[in-house]
Image (cartoon, grey):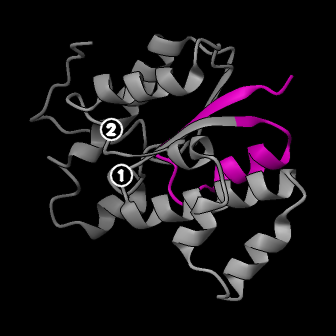
Amino acid sequence: MKLKFLDLFAGAGGLSEGFVRAGFCPVAHVEADQAACFTLRTRMAYHWLKSEGRAEQYNDYLYRKISRSELYSLVPDRPINSVINAEISKDSLPEIFIKTDELLDGDKLDLIIGGPPCQAYSIVGRSRDKNRMRGDSRNYLYVYYAEFLKHYRPSFFVFENVTGLLSAKDEDVIFISTI
């Protein structure tokens, strides 16, 4: 049985791609950027078609013989709907949990992977910002990752570490979890 995983702050799916290739089963990918979500959906279509011995249909998409919507129509809804286009925030967490729970369909989540956008707390990001990233809401996205850990209690998690995560501070903002 394949271990099931959730990818948070998924971007275009680099971490997911590695885990899928290693034999893990993605349940959901949560990403705020719409263009990255199209890439994720397209990769999910590819992996499904490949598993069905129909990778040539993906090649038809690559060579522009079929459109993206035609590609997606060749795949069941579940792989395409595994991509949740949402910004992770206090307000969006309940809806993301609901969608992820529906995709899990009663199964246990084994693994959570991901790492919040690093611009706000990376040393390079702070050095390039005139306010040194103070007041940037991205400073606290790692806290939401912890909310997913509390909600799902996976056996494992992989959190992308960024130099500067622990030293990034915003004295004007206090985050209190309400979940």
Element class at badge 2 = loop
Q: CA distance from mark 1 to mark 2?
A: 7 Å
Q: Which residue is mark 2?
A: 88
Label 1–label 2 contact, CB within 8 A: yes
The answer to which quarter of the image holds residue 137 is: top left
> Relative to residue 2, is residue 68 drawn left or right?
left
Q: In the image, what residue occupies the spot 32% across and 52% down?
A: 120
Where is mark 1, residue-wise?
A: 32
> In terms of depth relative to the viewer, which is nearer, 48 or 8?
48
Q: Is residue 79 above or below residue 147?
A: below
Residue found 20% across the figure and 17% down from its top = 176
Work out which residue is located at the far right of the displayed protein and give it: 53
Three-letter amino acid code at the position of disc 1:
Ala
- Residue 51 appears at what percent x and percent y? 85, 50
Residue 85: x and y in percent read 38, 49
Tell me which label, 1 or 2, sits earlier in the chain: 1
Task: Please give the range of residues in magenta.
Answer: 1-25
